[in-house]
Amino acid sequence: MTENWSSVFLTGRLDATNFVVINIGYAELQRHWRNNDISSPFARIYYVKQGQAIFHLPTGDLIASPGHLYLIPNYMPHSYESEIGFSVYYMYVFQRIHRQTDIFDLYEFPHEVPANKAIETLLKEFCTFFPQMHLSIHDANAFDNHPTFHDYVQQHMQLDLYKRMQLHGLVAIVFSFFMKYGQPRAEVTDPRIAHLVEYIQQHLSEPISIETLADHACLTKSYLIRSFRKTLGQTPLQYILQKKIQKAQTMLLGSELSVTEVAHAVGFQDTSYFIRLFRKSLGFTPQEYRRRLIG
């Protein structure tokens, strides 16, 4: 039986994916917790110990309850709020993609999965092992805004290798709960589409046309567009713009580059056009997005 390309591609890439844990900790919230219009370069994982929260996701509202794990993928727009007394273990994970493909491009994961006490014990122990990764204040703004995102990533990379291996192992264990219910995004066996996804990731700083992709994969433009839409649910140009905007989000949050410099770094020579696309995608200009997350 022929495996779909996403399964083959993921099998070859998952171990090499460089997950960076930028925060891990435990919070007992003593006041109403609410934040709106969030879209971050890192994925958020929660294990609810007590109380309830509501995640407002593009697919609808999700009530978070004790004994479950919750996953908010990177770059997903969302809002959330909780009642007083909500207690939760949290882990924020950044995927350093480089030449790999984003795991969320290959698989669709549920936002909620049942967990067990072993996960709670494991997260509790890791909170003890890595106190420097706790968020220092647990009000809404401090919990969701990351003024030192770049510093968090650098802090992770400066850890001893065995500590980074421990954190990577923790991510693998927690992700396995979601992988159990995860589904490949498409049943496509053509590896040429997989290689095009990788090609796009490697050339986000350049203009990328349909003609370039078709020539690179030795496909007709019409076949390319049909296959790409079937695989990822988007046209190639929609996917390229999405990935350019996501890279821009990461750069705005993790560097001091100007908006013009960020625009050029993701292949836009016209800064005004970049700003319009960014605002259309996220609802904020790049300047507003940076202010919201950096302060």
Image (spheres, rainbow, N blue to C red):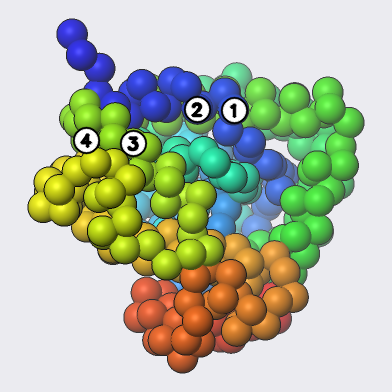
State the separation of the CA atoms marked 1 and 2: 5 Å
Q: Nearer the viewer, residue 204 or 17?
A: 204
Distance (Cα) linking label 3 and label 4: 11 Å
- For marks 3 and 1, the one nearer the N-term is 1
Task: Tell me what residue is drawn at x 26 percent, y 58 percent.
Answer: 211
Q: Which quadrant would residue 288 be assigned to in this image?
A: bottom right
Q: Secondary structure at mark 2?
A: helix
Residue annotated with mark 3: 194
Is 251 rendered above or below residue 5? below
Disc 2: which residue: 13
| Relative horizontal placement of residue 131, taking residue 222 as reference (left or right) | right
Q: Which residue is mark 4?
A: 186
In the depicted view, which residue is nearer to us: 169 or 285?
285
Q: Amino acid at mark 4?
A: Ala
Mark 2 touching mark 3, by CB under 8 A?
no
Q: Is residue 166 found left or right of 232 in the rendered image?
A: right
Considering only order in the chain, which callout, 4 or 2, is on the residue closer to the N terminus?
2
Q: Amino acid at mark 3?
A: Ala
Give the mark nearest the N terminus, 3 or 4: 4
**Which residue bears the numbered disc 1?**
16
Q: Residue at left 72%, top 61%? A: 149
